[in-house]
Image (spheres, rainbow, N blue to C red):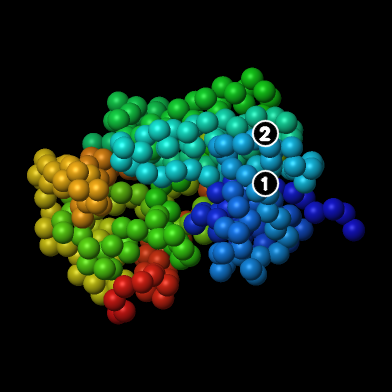
Amino acid sequence: MPKPRKILVTGATGFLGRHVLDALNSGQPHTQALVLCRRRADWNRQTWTAPLENVDVIEGGVTGSEGWTGDRRLKGCAGIVHLAAVVKHSRRNTAEVYETNIDGTLRMVRLAAQLNCRMVFVSTSGTVGCFDNPLEKADEDAPYVEPTVGNWPYYDSKIKAERQARAMAAQLGVQLVIIRPPILLGPGDHRFRSTGHVLKFLRLGFPFLVEGGMSFVDIRDAALAILRALDHPAARPVYHLHGTDCSVVDFFELCHQVSGVMPPANVLPFAVAHRLASSAEWVAHAAHKKSPLPDPVVIEMARHYWGLTSLHAERELDYHPRPARQTLADTVSWLRANAPAVRPH
């Protein structure tokens, strides 16, 4: 019997990591997942990891000690799926965001060169798809939108990571594939982060909305596309995983339709919302507490539109995102069953 193919997955304990591993288990039973986790106990603590088969834990991280990169289990690794990232938007977290999202990504490119394997790097659509016009959409050929997102640490870190990873990959002879999804929704967000705005909505936690837009896709569809990009014999350098583009108001109206929870009644002008958020953040920071309002950066982001499209994903990755209503219904259903302090329908 041939040895199973080995794939290294970073960020394996996160929301997307969970679905990538589920997809590997169900669709590629002869693939062994090597999951990078700082502590084996962190992996074992997850209730959803127990049923997974063909998974082996490598203790280490994309930052910190590099000793794990010499682990003999990595020998013969056929690919790297790099999901690990710090998704924090406050400017107070800039150093942490840059270290993981830039330095950690470059470490993985060097490892891919060492292992002579392809690397799939999951970035974000926000590197190219952020506009003032709700009708604009970014495809894979779109330029970076640094004038718009350059002052937002998370998106700026991803632009820098993409650029530097591409340059290093070209220098080292690594086949790098960049995947750009928008916001990821769906069931199974055990950390309540990517679906945090839906959770807050269900808890009646939004005092107001801001006129702007958002883009989202089902995480289950994204996970399948990521694995197809890893396996495609002639994968392109970039794929967009487009989903649903809508206004913020329409998004929460759809949340209302699938949940029965009323959407926030107040839609504030950006200037008013930003002033409130900035004041609340300043007071909370001085008191060493968490602000009850979104971070000012989140308000800045919310006023923009995040239109996305793809030239290649449907044809080459067999990418067909499911309807938005189904994604949101499954998200709400899972949160009601698993998140604390959520009102049942």
- Residue at image mark 1: 8
- Circle number at residue 19: none
Residue 8 at x, y percent in the picture: 67, 46
Q: Are marks 2 and 1 in contact (CB under 8 Å)?
A: yes
- For image coordinates 19% across by 43% down, the residue present is 286
Task: Answer above or below: position of 258 versus 149.
Answer: below
Quadrant of the image containing the C terminus: bottom left
Locate the N terminus by quadrant: bottom right
Q: Could one spot residue 220 in this view of the protein?
A: yes
Q: How far apart are the two marked residues, 2 and 1, measured between alpha carbons? A: 10 Å
Query: Can you name the residue that lies furthest to the top here?
Result: 171
x%, y% of residue 103?
52, 31
Give the image quarter of residue 304: top left
Q: Which residue is mark 2?
A: 111
Furthest toward the right, the residue is: 1
Q: Position of residue 131 (x, y in %)?
A: 28, 36
The answer to whether residue 62 is left or right of residue 332 is right
Tell me the kind of residue under disc 1.
Leu
Amino acid on which disc 2 is placed:
Leu
Total marks in image: 2
Closer-to-camera residue (129/90): 90
Residue 228: horizontal and vertical position, in percent?
A: 62, 49
- In the displayed structure image, the side of residue 130 where residue 311 appears, left or right: right
Q: Secondary structure at mark 1?
A: strand
Identify which residue is drawn at 42% across, 37% down: 97
Q: Is residue 311 visible?
A: no
Q: Which of disc 1 and disc 2 is earlier in sequence?
A: 1
